[in-house]
Image (cartoon, rainbow, N blue to C red):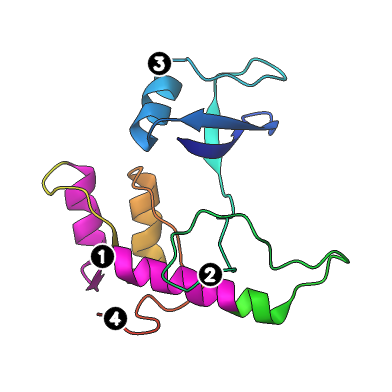
Amino acid sequence: MIVYNLACDQLHPFEGWFASPADFENQRDNGLVECPVCGSKEIERKLHAPRINVGAAPSTKVEATESATQPDGEIDPVKLREALLGFATHVRETTEYVGEQFAEEARAMHYGDKEHRGIRGRADRETAAELREEGIEFAALPFPVDFPNAH
């Protein structure tokens, strides 16, 4: 299951659980997703933060819920660093670095010309905006795409 943060055109936030990104899109496009506050069916996904395991080795899957925030609300810099390193390692180990070919590869997968796979690479702001306009989902990483190394 995938949990998405959603909002309607009236900006009411809510959460939705879907089997896949395609499942969300199909349900939304068929009017099956609606705002629990106002009933609007004009729904879009919003950004959400991943839950990162900082209590285990960096290669551990990104799915546990330990936080880098201390009980007083302050960020623990050691846990934050561990979380970012773990996340970076997970991304590096589970995606293919395609460098400057990111947009072309993303489009090929989106339009069914290539099989879907995890990729990371580079795109300038204009290209990123074009990808978003085409409905191609991606996220900017909080570290260089080749961190700690590209391959």
Can you say whether 32 is above or below 114 in the image? above
Relative placement, left or right, of 116 versus 138 is left
2 or 3: tag closer to the N-terminus:
3
Percent across and percent down for residue 7 are 62, 33
Q: Quick check: can you spot residue 97?
A: yes
Q: CA distance from mark 1 to mark 4?
A: 13 Å
Q: Quadrant of the C terminus?
A: bottom left
Percent across and percent down for residue 26 are 36, 23
Amino acid type, label 3? Asn
Residue under the image location 15 percent in, 47 percent down: 115
Q: Which mark is residue 150?
A: 4
Relative placement, left or right, of 58 versus 40 is left
Q: Which residues lie in the magenta part?
A: 82-111
Circle 1 residue: 102
2 or 4: tag closer to the N-terminus:
2
* Labels 4, 3: front one: 4
Q: Main SS of the magenta segment?
A: helix
- Label 3–label 1 contact, CB within 8 A: no
Circle 4 — which element?
loop
Circle 3 residue: 30
